Every structure is written in structure tokens, then in C-alpha cells.
Image (cartoon, helix red, strand yellow):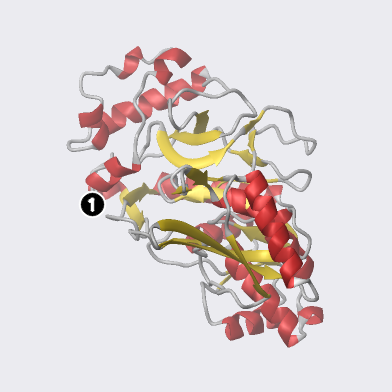
Amino acid sequence: MEISAKQLELVRKSIKAAMAKNGNLYQKKLAGFDPDDLKTAEDFKKLPFTEKSELREGYPLGIQAVPDEEVVRIHSSSGTTGTPIIIPYTKQDVDDWAMMFARCYRLAGITNKDRIHITPGYGLWTAGIGFQLGCELLGAMAIPMGPGNTDKQLKMMVDLESTVLCATSSYALLLAEEIERRGIRDQIKLRKGVIGSERWGDKMRARIANELGVELYDIYGLTEIYGPGIGINCEKEEHMHYWDDFIYLEIIDPKTGENVPDGKIGEIVITTLRKQGAPLIRYRTHDLCFIVPEPCSCGCEFPRIGRIIGRSDDMVKVKGVNIYPGQVEDVLRNVKGVSSEYQVMIDHLNGRDIMTLFFEMEAGADKDAVELAVADEFKTKVGLKIVPKGVAIGDLPRSEKKSTRIFDNRF
């Protein structure tokens, strides 16, 4: 989808504001560029991409584009893979984020009569407070639990009759399994689940939906671009609507940087249109997805992308074969007797790489037969011989936050 004249005007305004702030990333990155020369979609495509490494190099506030007195809050990436990225927010940024999040809730059929049980973390991370901002603007009851303390989570869920669960897919599964184990399913009033922050496969999705008895929705976002709430799927279809009055979204070929045709998988690139504290121009998210050009049957006119397939930087290479988590999930989805949880261990032993795929099996499944089927399917679909290891449901670790599924022990 080509950038519109209205969106171009907002981009020009953002660039001017950023370039006017001494020390801002874009003052240096776009030195000599006149924002008024940005007149067409082709002009826009000539703008350089912004990389995560540049945001890290700007630590702590090198991407701030407004005076200090206009900043009302900061959020931050975790910093687990390097220097954290600090994102400043103005009051308008916070209000805009709340507005987008409230839209997400409404599109999911959530109303001010709901009681929204919020388990993502609070603090520097954008998740918990984003879910709460949207909830309060919607006028629903926020139950700001944060992560952990599963006993208390379930007690409050029962006593307060929570109707919406907000969580990572990993923690939603942990809660679903614990509800089943304790035999309290009939005491749970949940009807919707809003799940974000990590990719999850169809088998995991089905388990959570069936065990909790809820409709599930994928919410999209990232710390650098407000946080969760910039897109969500509707009640009708699995593809996600995103708010193109706040962001402009492109899909590019990760290798060439060129825009790809609608429907083709590529990397999401986002330009903020209204963000004041830290506007970003053509930011490479590394999330892999595709544009859905057809109108949605729900009647919502906001454009759509598919589910997040994975990340371009999540790829590992084993014996010359590129492997993404999504490929592993696709293989396991097609094998009868396999449950949703898996873990990959990659080791270098006796001069060669070995990939061991641990996966949970449904009760009563024939271990030898399932392992053989998984190995055959992986060899056929991915082109790599692996060591399959079937385990019982519950044997692999559960997480209250994001789950790590691929461990590369070679380095």
C-alpha cells in the first residue's frame, strides 16, 4: 500500500521536529536533507532505514525529539541482547497509545462491562501499562495483576470473575494447565484472551482456547513503536488490522530492502506518524509478515497484515540449512500425537552439528511412531536430519513471560 499524501505530511512534520532537536538521531542521520523535498511515495522510499543498533548507540536519550519538559514517561526494551533502548513519551504519545489500545479491545468485542485481568509485566516494559491504559479508556474494570504468583492470579480470577485474560501465550498456557489441574474450570468466567509479545503456533492456540474456553486474539506491537496495541485481529478473521492513522507499515525483502508485493512474506518496517517523544522513520522491526490486501468481512476499513510468522534475526543455521521457529511449529502441527510445546537444542559434538527437537506428546501416543513421524516430516519439510525426543505433557518448562524455545549451544 503506497503512502498517502496525508501520511507524507505527517512524516515531514516528524522529520522536521526530530532534526530540530540537538543531538537527535535524525539530525545526524538526515543531515543536509530538506523534509519539504519529501513529496511522493518514491521520495519516501529513498529515506534510509532505521536500525535497532542505531537506537542502542543513542542510549540513553539520543532519539528524544522534544524538550525534556515535554517528556512525561520513559519505557525501555529489556536490554537482554545488548544496550537497552530508552523510548521517551509525551502526553500526546501516552494518550494516542491508550486510544489505539482501546480500539484493539473494541475490535475484539470487549466492552466496558468486561473485567480485564492483566498479567504482563509493569515498569520499564511497555506491556502491562499499555493493557491498562486501553482498559481504562474503554471504561472496563482493570485488574492489574502483573506476572507471577499463579495462586493469587487464579484466586483473583475466580473471586473477581475476570472475563478477559491478557497474557503472553506461554503464561496463558501455564494458567490453562493449572486451572485444569486444580479442577476449577467451572469457576472461571473468562470469555476472551488477548495474547501478545511472542509468536505462538496453531496447536498452542487451540490448547489455550479449548482449556480456557475463550476466543483468542493476537495483539501486535513493540517497545520502540509505543508498545502492544498498534494492531489486533477481529472476531471474523485471524489477520490483524493495524492503525494506519498512527503508523505507516511496509513489508520489505530483508536482503534487498525493496518493498515486496502484497501477500508475500517479508520484514515489517514501520514509520510513526504522530509520535512526538521518539518518532521513527522506516524502522526495521525484523518481524516477518505479509500484507493482506482484501477487505475484511468484519467491515473494519483499517488495513491488515497476517499473523507474525517469526523474526528475520531468529534464524539459526544448522549444517547449512536456515531454520526459523515457525518452520518447527509447522512440522509439529502436521504430526498426529504431538502437543503444542517444544524445545530445540543445537550442539556441536564430535566435529558435527546435532539438532535435538524435544516435543510434548498427547497422552496415549506411541512414542516411537511419533518420533519417527516428526523426524521424517522435518527432513521432508526443512531438509535436515534431526534427533527427535518425545516427552510427556508438562515435562518441558513453562514461563510466566516469554518462552525461549531454541538454544544454540555451539557458541
Q: Compared to 195, does 251 lie above or below?
A: above
Provide residue 11's location: percent of width, then percent of height: 41, 26
Q: Compared to 354, does 271 lie above or below?
A: above
Q: Quadrant of the C terminus?
A: bottom left
Q: Would you say 65 lies left or right of 160 here?
A: left
Camera-nearest residue between 200 and 390: 390
Provide residue 50's location: percent of width, then percent of height: 34, 34
Residue at 50% across, 23% down:
259
Q: Quadrant of the N terminus?
A: top right
Q: Would you say 212 lies left or right of 350 here?
A: right
Q: Which residue is mark 1?
A: 60
**What amino acid does circle 1 point to?**
Pro
Residue 28, quarter of the rendered image: top left
Q: Secondary structure at mark 1?
A: loop
The residue lying furthest to the front in this view is 350
Residue at 76% across, 84% down:
184
Q: Compared to 315, does 369 lie above or below?
A: below
Which class describes the residues within 10 Å of circle 1: few (<14), some (14-19), or many (20+)? some
Provide residue 296's location: percent of width, then percent of height: 75, 34
Provide residue 20's location: percent of width, then percent of height: 23, 30
Q: Compared to 265, does 260 lie above or below?
A: above
Residue at 75% across, 60% down:
206
Residue 188 seen by the camera: yes
